[in-house]
Image: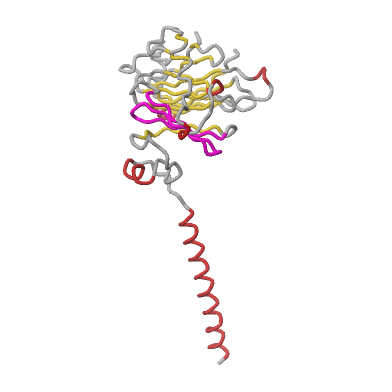
Amino acid sequence: MYKKLKQKFFGEAAKKKQEIREKSLENLNQNYHTFRLTEDNSKGFGVLGGYTAASNIDENVSSNLAFDKYQGLLAYGTRSGDIKMVSMKGYEQEIYGAHDGCAILHMLFVPGQLLLFSIDAKNRLVCRDLRSTGWQTSEGGDANLRSADVKVAASYNQKKLRGQ
Amino acid sequence: MDDPDVDLVSCFYVPPFLTSEPDNHNHLFIGMNSGSVHIFDIKKKEFSDFTIRNLKQTEVNVLNYHRVSDMKCQPEKMHRLLIAHEKCQVRVYNMNK
């Protein structure tokens, strides 16, 4: 008799615990956003799984990400040569034609210096100084980053081209 | 840098800036598929004269270095650069000597 009661009591308690776990898992699943940057889900949910609804760059995301932990900035490039930057404060910035339509292969922030380096498929290294710009949201309309401060020619001959 | 048909950038790296300013050397390291490393001066915005060439190009027939897969600086002594190549070769460069 005692054993049956024990089984009933502990069985119910175990069931309740399991239900609580399942509920918590459901909540986790609801709050969880996947960050898979495929072309299919980027069209449906925005580039970052629903975080960037106002995004216009929704295709051709290449596999490069740059992150500055001091400034809270995340940037990525696309195969069509565009760059998108997202701030931890919620601002967004898009740079169209950053590499003249050439695929961006590598991107990197200089930590704490607001400098963004990017290299494209033609071996062009572009340095962007974000300090010389007004950081605005993409919805603000007139949000143009001053484009490449320095472009280094593809051939390695110490050329220094200032401005665009 | 070299022509992309010949050689392509495989990785690049900027060491983090330290609070002790003299230890910052303000350079960007660009690793290539051929195994050589180009160095870019961040302050002057130009390539440095110093490049770490692949041994193949310097015609020293000891080791053939492959694609640069990763680079890191030692956090306390930033002049020491660790270059990892594919197929398990690792080079340590002391840039002040």
Quarter of the rendering occupied by the N terminus of chain A:
bottom right
Residue B31 screen position, x and y as percent:
44, 21
Colour style of the rendered protein structure: secondary structure
Q: Is residue A164 magenta?
A: no
Instruction: Indicate whether B85 appears above or below A37.
Output: above
Figure disc tally:
0
Give the residue drawn at x 56%, y 82%.
A9
Camera-side residue: A90 or A99? A90
Residue B73 screen position, x and y as percent:
56, 25
Camera-side residue: A126 or A139? A139
Q: Residue furthest bottom?
A: A1
Instruction: Indicate whether B23 appears above or below A51.
Output: above
Q: Residue furthest front?
A: A141
Residue A21 screen position, x and y as percent:
51, 66
Residue A89 screen position, x and y as percent:
56, 38
Q: Is residue A90 magenta?
A: yes
Quadrant in the picture for residue A37: top left
Q: Relative to residue A106, is residue B18 drawn left or right?
A: right
Give the residue drawn at x 42%, y 15%.
B55
Quarter of the rendering occupied by the C terminus of chain A:
top left
Span of residues in magenta: A72-97
